[in-house]
Image (cartoon, rainbow, N blue to C red):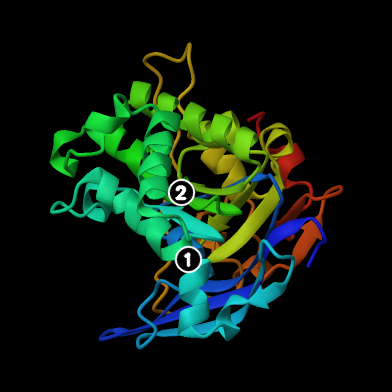
């Protein structure tokens, strides 16, 4: 684990036991998140982004989940722990205090029977030794920080009295209440309109700078990655296929899947033109995958791509990609 990393995920595997068989949802994922870094995790729906993120907090039903690999977490005291070695009571102390998570739909995450102030205060009561008056003051301060005003009046309201964007701000306030080292945002702007999405992204970026925490941003939107992230990892069929800085990912994408995703972004000045799509569909994770999972959809695929899984190659410091064809990016159209 790098000395500057908050989280190091090493060969993570997540297998789900279902009535149809074993789903290999995550198939050997490895990447690190540095201190103060905003790291994007991007890919199509169903590629394993949320499964990977939830594993950091072990939020899966462990009676039906088999884990493999390691998730090393550097706690605020400096100690490094493997999340899979933590007992239940230790894990409860990590959740919310060391690592917090914002889910996609805030209305599902908020309790409709409790006021907003009570729900934020619950986090503080569980993880801190603050007095009731200090908890109330901290709650109002958090609401002010995320732009919910007047905080005193709004803290006494219930979730149904807030719009989707305001509810997402409340979730951010709850997540930040105990000053976590890592904030996981799981497609937290997907259900919002474009204006509100921009406001939430600006809020997260400004809070990250002021607090100095790290953020793992899960999205399928490359525009969001370009707007807010420092580094990004691209996932496909339960594996990381490319990791680099955001600038290099857009300027010189190496993996054909990354190139295809960037080509599919709608561009200005192209009115009336047919949108670029990726043919085919991701493979079923219920069946064994031989070779490169993207090979059936890849225009560069050779015979060995279909039978042998490609290793991670390097294209400069911090830029890794899993492909047998190092010149594919040079042959591709400019993306």
| 7 lies above or below 80 | above
Label pair 1/2, CB-CB below 8 angstroms: no
Task: Kindly identify which numbered label has been placed on residue 229.
Answer: none
Q: Is residue 47 left or right of residue 214?
A: left
**Of the residues tagged 1 and 2, which is closer to the observer?**
2
Image quarter in which the N terminus is found: bottom right
For the point 58% across and 76% down, the residue is 83
* Of callouts 1 and 2, the N-terminal one: 1
Image quarter in which the C terminus is found: top right
For the point 37% across and 35% down, the residue is 143
Task: Kindly identify which numbered label has been placed on residue 177.
Answer: 2
| 161 lies above or below 188 | above
- The percent position of residue 44, horizontal first and vertical second, equals 44, 51
- The percent position of residue 330, horizontal first and vertical second, equals 76, 38
Q: Is residue 223 left or right of residue 283?
A: right
For the point 53% across and 68% down, the residue is 94
Mark 2: which secondary structure? loop
Distance between the alpha carbons at the discs numbered 1 and 2: 12 Å
For the point 48% across and 60% down, the residue is 128
The residue indicated by pointer 1 is: 95
| Front-lying residue, 128 or 13 | 128
Neighbourhood count class around disc 1 (C-alpha, 10 Å): few under 14, some 14–19, many 20 upward: some
Res 276 → quadrant:
top left
- The percent position of residue 103, horizontal first and vertical second, equals 36, 52
């Amino acid at each position: 684990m790098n000395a500057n990393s908050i989280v190091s995920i090493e060969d993570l595997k997540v297998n789900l036991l279902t009535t149809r068989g074993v789903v290999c949802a995550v198939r050997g994922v490895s990447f690190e998140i540095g201190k103060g870094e905003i790291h994007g995790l991007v890919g199509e729906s169903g590629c394993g982004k949320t499964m990977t993120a939830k594993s950091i907090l072990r939020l899966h039903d462990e009676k039906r989940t088999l884990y493999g690999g390691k998730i090393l977490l550097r706690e605020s005291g400096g100690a490094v722990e493997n999340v899979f070695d933590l007992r239940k009571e230790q894990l409860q102390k990590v959740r919310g205090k060391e690592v917090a998570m914002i889910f996609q739909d805030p209305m599902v995450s908020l309790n409709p029977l409790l006021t907003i102030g009570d729900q934020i205060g619950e986090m503080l009561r569980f993880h801190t030794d603050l007095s009731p008056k200090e908890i109330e003051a901290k709650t109002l301060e958090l609401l002010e920080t995320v732009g919910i005003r007047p905080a005193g009046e709004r803290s006494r309201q219930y979730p149904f009295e807030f719009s989707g964007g305001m509810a997402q701000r409340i979730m951010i306030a709850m997540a930040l209440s105990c000053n976590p080292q890592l904030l996981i945002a799981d497609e937290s702007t997907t259900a919002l309109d474009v204006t509100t999405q921009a406001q939430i992204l600006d809020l997260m970026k400004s809070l990250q700078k002021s607090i100095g925490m790290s953020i793992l941003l899960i999205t399928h939107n490359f525009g969001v990655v370009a707007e807010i992230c420092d580094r990004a990892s691209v996932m496909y069929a339960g594996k990381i296929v490319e990791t680099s800085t955001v600038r290099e990912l857009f300027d010189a994408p190496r993996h054909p899947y990354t190139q295809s995703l960037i080509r599919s972004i709608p561009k200005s000045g192209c009115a009336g033109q047919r949108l670029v799509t990726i043919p085919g569909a991701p493979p079923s994770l219920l069946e064994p995958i031989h070779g490169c999972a993207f090979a059936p959809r890849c225009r560069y695929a050779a015979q060995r791509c279909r039978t042998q899984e490609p290793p991670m190659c390097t294209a400069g410091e911090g830029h890794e990609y899993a492909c047998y064809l190092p010149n594919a990016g040079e042959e591709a159209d400019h993306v």
